[in-house]
Image: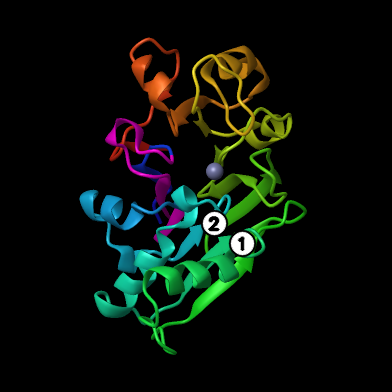
């Protein structure tokens, strides 16, 4: 079995479509399995652009229940039922209320379209900072981060094929990010702002100042807002673009 972990950045954008970038979505392929980290509204489009087949996904992990991070799930389910005619199970992993929010979004966007039968088992599992969850070959840990009012907003840590990868999700600075990054090959950090420290989001200057606290081999940026995009050629970290591939 290959030990290579392939990370494809399907969507590197923010909630506002800044720079024409797609909503948050990262595709991980390792050990013969495929997993999405976040699935924002445009994720199905992004997967198709990257030549990734949604029918081959085993699970989807959602960091928090904002539309640019989970709003693509209704489209994924619709495609699975009517185009891929999926039969094998799909596992959706995320904060408490994921199932309720997915069902509400599906009903709002495509009333009655799924009917009673999806045609395949859809399994919901809940993230819990106190436990590592195992989904196939992936070990999924999470920590609480600070983004808006909800307590159920997570940074994610994935271990597969002997490699660890961290993803901040959306958050302002919290010391929980130190443990999240510790020992990771790669940390995907949201970086919405440049030098304004905002509630709810990270900014570039904070990440520069905190880089020494983050014990990860590489740090790459995603979720760039408009002011960050203007600075993107003069940064000390790599900026992910839609379609980028990183092998770990
Ligand atoms: Zn958010």
Q: Which residue is mark 2?
A: 138
| Secondary element at image label 2 | strand
Circles 1 and 2: CB distance less than 8 Å?
yes
Q: Is residue 22 left or right of residue 63?
A: left
Q: Tell me, what colour scheme is on the image?
A: rainbow
Asked if the residue at label 1 sits under 8 Å from ligand 1, the reply is no
Please say whether residue 241 is visible from this viewpoint. Answer: yes
Q: Secondary structure at mark 1?
A: strand
Q: Badge 1 local density, few (<14 within 10 Å), some, or many (20+)? A: few
Q: Quadrant of the C terminus?
A: top left
Residue 118 locus on image (x, y percent)? 40, 83
Quarter holding residue 203 = top right
Q: Residue at 56% across / 17% down in the picture?
A: 196
Vertical relation: 167 (above or below) 98: above
Lateral position of residue 148 relative to residue 49, left or right: right
Please state the extent of the stretch shown in magenta in the rendering.
Answer: 15-37
Residue 134, label in figure: 1
Q: Is residue 192 above or below residue 49?
A: above
- Residue 218 in the image: x percent, y percent? 50, 25
- Is 190 displayed left or right of 214 in the figure? left
Mark 2 surroundings: few (<14), some (14-19) or many (≥20) residues within 10 A: many
- Quarter location, residue 32: bottom left
Q: Is mark 2 within 8 Å of ligand 1?
A: no
The one nearer the camera, 101 or 205, is 101
Decide whether residue 16 is among the magenta residues: yes
Relative to 170, say whether 36 is above or below: below
Residue at the bottom extreme, as displayed? 116
81 inside magenta stretch: no
């Amino acid at each position: 079995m290959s030990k290579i972990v392939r990370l494809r950045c399907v969507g590197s954008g923010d909630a506002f479509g800044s720079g024409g970038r797609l909503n948050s979505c990262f595709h991980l392929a390792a050990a013969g399995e495929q997993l999405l980290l976040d699935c924002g509204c445009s994720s199905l489009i992004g997967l198709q652009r990257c030549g990734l087949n949604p029918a081959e996904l085993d699970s989807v992990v959602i960091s928090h229940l904002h539309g640019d991070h989970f709003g693509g799930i209704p489209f994924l389910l619709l495609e699975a039922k009517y185009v891929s005619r999926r039969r094998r199970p799909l596992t959706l992993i995320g904060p408490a209320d994921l199932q309720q929010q997915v069902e509400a979004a599906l009903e709002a966007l495509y009333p009655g379209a799924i009917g009673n039968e999806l045609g395949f088992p859809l399994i919901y599992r809940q993230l819990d900072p106190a436990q590592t969850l195992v989904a196939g070959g992936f070990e999924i840990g999470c920590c609480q981060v600070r983004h808006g009012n909800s307590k159920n907003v997570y940074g994610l840590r994935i271990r597969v094929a002997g490699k660890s990868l961290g993803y901040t999700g959306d958050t302002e600075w919290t010391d929980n990010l130190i443990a999240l990054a510790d020992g990771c090959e790669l940390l995907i950090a949201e970086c919405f702002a440049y030098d304004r420290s905002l509630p709810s989001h990270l900014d570039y200057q904070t990440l520069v100042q905190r880089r020494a606290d983050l014990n990860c081999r590489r740090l790459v940026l995603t979720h760039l807002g408009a002011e960050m995009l203007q600075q993107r050629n003069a940064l000390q970290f790599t900026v992910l673009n839609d379609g980028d591939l990183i092998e770990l």
